[in-house]
Structures are given as structure tokens and as C-alpha cells.
Amino acid sequence: MTTKCRAFWLEGPDQPALRSQELGPLAPGMVEIASRFGAISRGTEALVAAGRVPASEHERMRAPFQDGDFPFPVQYGYATVGEVVAGPGERLGETVFCLYPHQDRFQLPAGMAVPVPGSLPAERAVLAANMETALNVVWDARIAPGDRVAVVGSGLVGLLVAWLAAGIPGTDTCLVDLNPERASIARALGCRFAAPADIPHDCDVVIHASASAAGLATAIDAAGFEARIVELSWYGDRPVSVPLGGAFHSRRLQIVGSQVGHVPPERRARWSLGRRLAAALALLDDPRLDGLVSGETRFTDLPGRYAGILADPATLCHRVRYD
């Protein structure tokens, strides 16, 4: 027996489409998921949609269960919450989070369908992949109680990093962004807010998440003596100017790359990717994070709206609803 489904594909540069596909019989050890909600990762998906994944990163940038190959045609995405509709009897009806591209029904190994805590709304659970990235950044940044922290760039992951940092006792966390409308979100998440012209200085840790050369320069300016700057932005195939003159060397600054594909070395022996994802889901149990959802689109309407969602700088988490 086969089951029909619909999958979201990028057929060419900025050419989204829905494809009808068929799922074969369910193999042992697998579960079948009916999607309920998904999330668009604006920064990464915009680079993928424009065909700007460098050839050197085609293999490393593959999303779990991605179909097709970069640049095109490719099926991309990595945040779906759904219900187990086939598989082991004890799992039927379970709400799960899966790292799976945008698709209304799919099959995957049972161990890759991570249970969503009962207290966590499925609508908010779509933030799990972004929270997982933010948690990894905080580990890479080594933020400690009492630190002065600046987060430059208030996209979705930057906001989640700021929220995590602000929750560490005694930490003074400031979100820095050009958009003054993000000030209210910062306050709701327990952070201060500043425009780039008013950045805090002498910070112990700075996280850069604006994906711009100007933002990286701001992050370097905010760093104190021997401070740690964590570069979270991914630029695809775009070259970026880094201001390493001035006081960069005399202040003995560090710039550290962070990427969610690996747990930081000091935790790798104990933290599997599964444990990290479960921790990210648990961290989402805070209703304040509902304010990070900036819009919602029905899955069947997604091809017509996708380009506008990616182009809108106000987009944080854009949720996909399957019905």
C-alpha cells in the first residue's frame, strides 16, 4: 500500500512548488507522521532558495532527510511538528518534533521522532531547531553568571540566544539592532536594547547574529579586553570584510565560529544530538516565546507566499500550518 503526500520543493532560484509524492509501505522501526506545524528558517532558507550554498558546502549543508541536491531541485527545511499515525502501537497519537523538510506526511526512523513534552503547545514546539542552535551558541560562548553580554542582531536565533543569556543569574544582556521595534521584544525576553550607535562596551562575551559586515564591526567594538566574540551568522557564498585593525590585536580578542552540526568539544562526550534536542524542547516551555512567531501560512499557500516571507526583514519564526 502507498500513501500520497505533498512536498515543498525549490525547482530553481526562487521557484518554489508543491510536488505530489507517494510513501511506500512502512518498514520495521519506522513511524509515519502527519504534519501539524512547521517553521521556516528565514536566513538559511533564503540562501538556499537563491542558490547561494557554496559548492564546497553542498554535503555539509544537507538537512536531515533532504531530497534532491544543491543547488536545484532541492527539498529543504528542518522543523516539523506532527502526530504519529502509523508505527508501534504505543506511539500512535504521539505529538513529535522532527528535523524534516516541509512535507505534509512522511516516514522516518522512530528514534528521530522526538516526543514533545505534554506541557508544550505544538504551535511553539516548531521553534525547537532554532532553540537547539541558540543553546549550542551559548555553550560555544561560555557565558557565565555576572557576564556582560551583547547580542548583535535580533533575528530569531539572536533573540533566543539573548533570552537564554538573560536567564543566567547576574548576567547583563543587551540586544543590539538597527530596528527600534525590537526593543519591546527584548524587554519581554528580559534584555536591554540598544541601537548600534549606543552599544555597550567592555563586554565579556559578544554574539554576532546580523549576517552583515557592519554588524560584525559593531560586535568587535563592543568586546572588552580578551573577550570572546562568537560568530553565529552564515554568509553562504558572500565574502565579508572583517575589521582586524585598530585595537583588535591589542585587546587580544577572539572570534569563534559556532555551528549547530556539532556539540562543542567540552560537552561532546556526554551530550548526544538527541539529548541536546530534548533539552531545547524543554527550554521552550515559556509562553513569552510565543511572541517570536511573526506570521503563519497554510502549507498549500506556501509556494505563492514563500518569496515574500524570506524577503521580509520583520520575519522571525514564520509558522506553516498543515490542514
Image: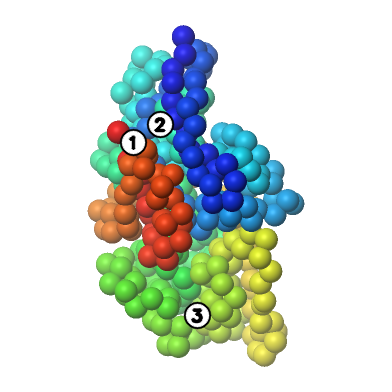
Q: Can residue 113 be seen in this view?
A: no
Residue located farthest toward the top when viewing the structure as drawn:
1
Q: Is disc 1 surrounded by few (<14), some (14 to 19) or many (20+) residues within 10 Å?
A: some
Q: Is residue 320 above or below residue 151?
A: above
Which of the labelled discs sits on residue 322, or is there none?
1
119 relative to 42 in the view: left or right = left
Taking depth in this image into account, of 125 and 227 the one nearest to the observer is 125
- Occupied quadrant, residue 114: top left
The amino acid marked with disc number 3 is: Cys
- Occupied quadrant, residue 145: bottom left
Q: Are the residues at dot 1 and dot 2 in contact (C-beta closer than 8 Å)?
A: yes
| Residue bearing mark 2 | 104
Q: Is disc 3 surrounded by few (<14), some (14 to 19) or many (20+) residues within 10 Å?
A: many
Where's residue 95, x and y in %? 33, 31
Element under label 1?
A: loop
Nearest to the eye among marks 3 and 1: give it: 1
Residue located farthest toward the bottom when viewing the structure as drawn:
246
Taking depth in this image into account, of 250 and 194 the one nearest to the observer is 194
